[in-house]
Amino acid sequence: MCGIVGFVGEDENALPFLLEGLQRLEYRGYDSAGVAVVQENHLTVEKRQGKLQRLVEALTTTSVRGSCGIGHTRWATHGRPTDQNAHPQLDCHGQIAVVHNGIIENYQTLKAELMARGHHFRSETDTEVIPHLLEEYGGLDDLKTAVERAEARLTGAYAFLAISATHPDQIVAVRRSSPLVVGLGERTNYLASDFTAFLRHTRRAVVLDNGDLAVIRPWSVEIHDANGVAVERPVLHIDWTLDQAERGGYPHFMLKEIMEQPEAWADCLLGRIERGRVVEEALGLTAEELKAIRRVVMVAAGTAYHAGLVGRVLVESLAGIPVEVDVASEFRYRRPLLEPGTLVVAISQSGETADTLASVSLAKEMGLKVWAVTNTVGSTLAREADTVGYTYAGPEIAVASTKAYTTQILLLTLFAIALAQAQGRAYPELAEQVLSLPEAGKSVLSAMQGLHGLGQELAQHRDVFFIGRGLDWALAQEGQLKLKEISYLHAEAYAAGELKHGTLALIEEGVPVIAILTQPELADKAISNVLEVKARGARVWAVVSANLSGVPADRLIPIPATAPLLAPVLAAIPLQLLAYWTAVSRGEDVDQPRNLAKSVTVE
Ligand code: AGP
């Protein structure tokens, strides 16, 4: 997820607007930033690795004036955060500039083709193929036609803006899946990834549809749909405050990030499954490397550790390869016995967790190969590991991890299928079902309105228990952590069959128990455990797959039926929302809970 902005007007205020807009979009990415402004028939381009402030400082001594420009704040996906990889990206002669959000899936093929035709590439990004394609298709003469022709060559989910030195009064914009909105001003128009960027200047906006191509001039906005037909899109009046707009209109980043999950899952899956097979290279691994793996050890902390617990079940079930999962702070000190043929999988949203990094160093000292599962390109983990699979969830701002967790599980699901493929066992049906998860996620989110009331109820209690078996137990552990960390209620997760070995003594009249039942094979046993706690007076709320019946809970929270191994990502959503609404009911600081930091870079 990156932030893009554009300005085209009759006065020369492009640069101040671009910097202001980027500052408002910095929450979408902050590892590098850049701008390009058309000035006297040439492009002035400035970009800097690091926070936006570095770019602002670099521009204070220049006198860039222009009435048309584009800007970008980056959350790296392809290529490390460096000055060269920052956007805008340019054609060979620096006369066409492009800023882009999303992923161009087929960039390697296009890059090879363009290089063979003599184009000179300067970055490691997927984006750079766009300005070179525009150059190839005569963008300096007719930018719109060149964009149409280039767009027909691209696959992926993205939005981009293009300008050229020869078109000082227009921006050509394309939206395919990634968000893009137009702000309508007085003889000035704006473009941005979301309304926040231009709300201070105008509240009149048009949301581009998927497949739209728009030509924006100071006095006009011309939109063509995916079939090239000229269309009018409704003009909206945005009455959010600036603060609300930054959070997409949601009261907290956590809720925004929960709601973003279907989009994050689609980004994470993009280009990774083809014709019922996982594309190994798209995970950062080769089929040969996967074939050589005899054992897997996963190390991580907190929520990422819980993703590893899910990953263990997936890998063992699908690939039949033994997996251990360890909390990084324990692994690094327990002198683990690791033999050759072991792949160490280090899972971390930030890629900066000190204990996880120390575990990676230890594994490397022992001569083992490390595969990182991380959300952060350019992080220490991404640099230290031998190879990396990115989760592509976009920046996660709330301390409580939500979309990073479910994308970690998705990537581990693909890893498990890829490992099975290497053993000669393909799972084409399962792989296809994985692709339907973003749609299923949307229906879970739209069915969860009632959880608000359950959160209010839960907020009245002191202790909450989460129970489940198999994958549901792994998920229960994440459910209790979410609730604890933002609502400050005491919560514990138990393997449902373990209750009778001690914890059952704590169950008394009215104690809330959240039961998770998504695994048909274990359903009868799990139902017995629900009956056990109910017999002691517990009030049971059950997250249940729609294909399971007869669960004797006080309140059912159904999720759509899917392959049992894929249920955790869907079932995670009600647990996240339950924690969220409980914390809101208690009036806690949801996004920044007490005593916690987003990234724990100390021991
Ligand atoms: C979970 O909501 C927490 N933010 C925390 O447990 C987190 O998952 C843990 O600190 C690990 O962080 P990482 O994924 O960035 O390594």
Image: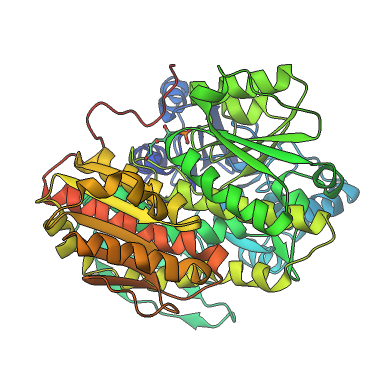
Relative horizontal placement of residue 480, taking residue 239 as reference (left or right): right
Q: Is residue 219 visible?
A: no
Q: Nearer the viewer, residue 93 or 161?
A: 161
Q: How many marks?
A: 0
Q: Is residue 592 visible?
A: yes
**Please, is residue 436 above or below residue 381 in the view?**
below
Residue in the picture at 56% in, 57% down: 267
- x then y, percent, for residue 222: 47, 72
- x then y, percent, for residue 478: 39, 47
Q: Ligand 1, what quadrant?
A: top left
Quadrant that contains the C terminus: top left
Task: Identify the colour scheme used.
Answer: rainbow
Residue in the picture at 38% in, 80% down: 549
- x then y, percent, for residue 201: 26, 51
Relative horizontal placement of residue 420, taking residue 191 as reference (left or right): right
Relative horizontal placement of residue 566, taking residue 576 as reference (left or right): right
Q: Nearer the viewer, residue 500 or 353?
A: 500
Q: Nearer the viewer, residue 284 or 39?
A: 284
Relative horizontal placement of residue 137, taking residue 88 as reference (left or right): right
Q: Residue furthest right?
A: 116
Q: Nearer the viewer, residue 535 or 74?
A: 535
- x then y, percent, for residue 422: 82, 54
**Please, is residue 109 above or below residue 29 in the view?**
below
Q: Which picture quadrant has residue 207?
A: bottom left
Q: Which picture quadrant has residue 380?
A: top right
